Amino acid sequence: METRKHLFYGAALLTILFWGTAYTLIGYIVAYVSPAWIVAVRTTIAAIVLTIYALLRGHKFPSLRDKVWQWYAFMGFIGLALPFYLNARGQVYVESGLTAILAGVMPLITIVLAHFFVKDEHLSWRKAIGFLIGFAGIVFLFLPMPLKWDLVETWRSQGLILLTAICYGSTTIIAKRAPETPASIGAAMMLLAASLMSLIWALSTGTPEVMPPQSAIIAMILLALGGTGISQILYLRIIKIKGPSYIAKMVYLVPIFSIISGIIFLNEPFSWRSITALGIIFVGLFISQMGKRV
């Protein structure tokens, strides 16, 4: 029993690490590869690897007529293809640490969505106050310095990244309500659907004219295997065991990993503004989760 508990927390920590470093990898890759092709390549590689993994484990995919495909295909779009593209587009102009903070408001969005779609997770006054405080942290990121009646210069790109948080929050709720499916099969189904959609979109934008450098290719492979494939299996497994609220708690740590990773590997500047906004968001999340058991 104790071993299983340690394995679970190890899987949770590994997922946080994969998610945090994914923003750093994208921040590097986007200088050489278009957002559409980043998504197409990362989802395709991950889909192939996870399909082979699921089959080797002896699992069988459901019939294409089975409605479970509709659930996981939709999750593949709303939880992978769409937010991956929005995130990559946003990271053309936004550093990886700030990206993780913006995407990290997913728990706040999950809290609101869970009120309507998850039994016994109603929106209390404490959760509402926490949400408002967290939202204030996001507003702080959008304010220019020094203060004036204009939005920050990269507000459009930041807005795209903020939309990814809505996508991830929605997917967390849908995953909890989806038909029971082995995590490896569910992840493979999501990635197969996301890969097909992403490839169609990428091809419509045209094929790349120049091969990216070897370092970018290696980064793409790492992103596909860790931040896309393995993390997706762990994510579905964790959410089935603990539910959306536990995933929300895990996301607290993602921006911290991403900020540190961005400073070390991308030479991104340390920003007190980002740290302050992250602190405000954390306060909101803490208040919203007070009284709940981990």
Image: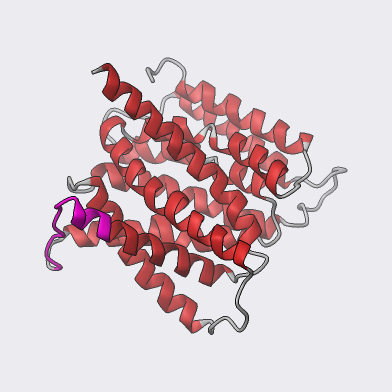
Q: Is residue 54 magenta?
A: yes
- Quarter holding the C terminus is top left
Residue segment shown in magenta: 52-64
Residue 207, given in percent of the width and then of the height, sits at 53, 83
Residue 268, given in percent of the width and then of the height, sits at 75, 46
Viewer-closest of 22 and 111: 22
Viewer-closest of 137 and 40: 40
- Please tell me in which quadrant of the rendered image residue 278 appears: top right
Q: In this view, does 254 lie above or below 205?
A: above
Q: In this view, does 12 lie above or below 174?
A: above
Res. 191 visible in picture:
no
Viewer-closest of 107 and 125: 107
Residue sitting at 62 percent across and 62 percent down?
215
Q: Is residue 17 left or right of residue 144?
A: left
Q: Is residue 166 left or right of residue 72?
A: right
- Please tell me in which quadrant of the rendered image residue 32 appears: bottom right
Viewer-closest of 246 and 227: 227
Residue sitting at 40 percent across and 46 percent down?
231
- Quarter holding the N terminus is top left
How many marks can you see? 0
The colour scheme used to paint the residues is secondary structure
Judged by its main secondary structure, the magenta piece is loop
Residue sitting at 29 percent across and 46 percent down?
175
Residue sitting at 85 percent across and 47 percent down?
148
- Residue sticking out furthest to the front: 214
Q: Is residue 226 magenta?
A: no
Q: Is residue 94 left or right of residue 258?
A: right
Res. 227 visible in picture:
yes
